Amino acid sequence: MKLKFLGANRQVTGSSYLLEAAGKRIMIDHGMFQERKFQERNWDPCPVSPKSIDVLLLTHAHLDHCGLIPKLVRDGFNGRIVTTEPSAELAQLVMNDSARIQQEDVKYKQKRHRKAGVKSKHPYEPLYTVEDAERVSGRFDTTGFDTPVDLGNDITVTYHEAGHILGAASLAIDVSANGTKRRVIFSGDIGQADAPIVGDPTLFESADHVVMESTYGDRDHRDSGNVRDLLEKVIKDTIERGGNVVIPTFAIERAQEMMLHLTELIQAKRVPCLPVFLDSPMAVNATEIFLRHRDYMDDQMQEALESGRLRNAWHCVNLVRTVDGSKSINNIKGTAIIMAGSGMCTGGRVKHHLVANIGRPESTILFVGYQSVGTLGRMIRDGRRDVRIFGIKRDVFANIATIDGFSAHGDREDLLKWVGNIKQPRKVFLTHGDAEAADNLCGEIKSKHGYDAHVPQYLDEVELD
């Protein structure tokens, strides 16, 4: 068996791997690179011939795991895409939205560069179009959790709850060859135990090789305090200053979780009844997908749906679909809470709300999700005093706040517990984390568990036997 690392190596985004086993070429995820310093890779040809890939296994629907699949299909991949039912629907939503944003951005850049007499490094065309994204829909072969899927040549894959977002999975790939059986586990993104909406991450007992994420491999969430208390403080402080709370929000899971927290704070009268806007057509559509797949939610969320508590939360939020509706938000006087995508400020409507608020000392930009190195969100969160938005340098005067406890990723303690439950794997590979986080977790795994752990480089290839 051979394993090639095609992304998310000493960085967070662009997750993609190629496993060669028993004559099969199996790709696991094919995500978009979102950090600015690595975005050039999105435009490069796939390091592996798309036509040579037999099957693609998708762990979940985030853009950094599925965002380059339309390009892969357009360039010749003709196999099936195995994933869970919610992930298939959510990934299609994410890919369609990504294509639409790319097409809109191309039009905007053409207009801006034409005025400024600037030549772009890339051709004036999107990575892929909405039509390219739509072609992916016929490739999905869906499965549930805990049910082995036959990939041929005595290879099976079983999807297990990852506790990350709805339908997200860790993959156990079992390969039988020459009278021996080998198991390779791909963690996908590992969530926190007792997180809202989804179940707890599956703990595995055995594996020969493990490929696991390391997003928060150098920090813990538990010291961050109660997220609802912290959210209440941010809102009250911003009300006193008379500004807006702008929350860059991931459309899947985070948007639904934020609606629940905000509405319960208002219903408990811990914060005043404020205008709350979910300015994201994709988040609205994702919510509808959630409702169709309640059986993938944890018991508490299913109970909340049955009791109507979550529906009440949605009714308290203004759901904004149109461009005109989005523009009108910035005409509101007084404090409003504005949730908009994208979660790392790499595109979408949040950029317009940042333009309207980032220069206002009264307003707060609140980050409730991971910000990859090199993204606009990370630059703002790390305290840059000026940032470039829509090609124009903007001074940052707004208050910048972060609540890490909302993260859909497990922290260092969660990750060490997850991998420590596996009995003496031959090797552990750390991916999907900035270099510092991955190296830190690698050292912790070696010292605490005594495992052979390694942080691969981009395009490294290793023999697994």
Image (cartoon, rainbow, N blue to C red):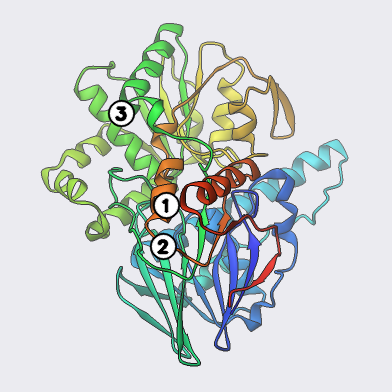
Mark 3 surroundings within 10 Å by alpha-carbon count, few (fewer than 14), some (14 through 19), many (20 or more): many
Q: Which of the 4 image quadrants contains residue 205?
A: bottom left
**Tags 3 and 2 in contact by the CB under 8 Å rule?**
no
Above or below — where is 387 with respect to 306?
A: above
Closer to the chain start, of discs 2 and 1, is 2
Q: Position of residue 221 (x, y in %)?
A: 42, 33
Mark positioned earlier in the residue sequence (1 or 3):
1
At mark 1, the secondary structure is loop
Q: What amino acid is at disc 1?
A: Ile
Residue labelled with disc 2: 170
Residue for point 40% across, 21% down: 336
- The answer to whether residue 6 shows anywhere in this view is yes
Q: Report the residue marked by disc 1.
A: 190
Q: Callout 2: helix, strand or loop?
A: strand
Image position of 46 (left or right of 8) = right
**Which label sits in the foreground, 3 or 2?**
2
The residue carrying mark 3 is 262
161 or 242, which lies in front? 161
Q: 424 or 258, which is in the foreground?
A: 424
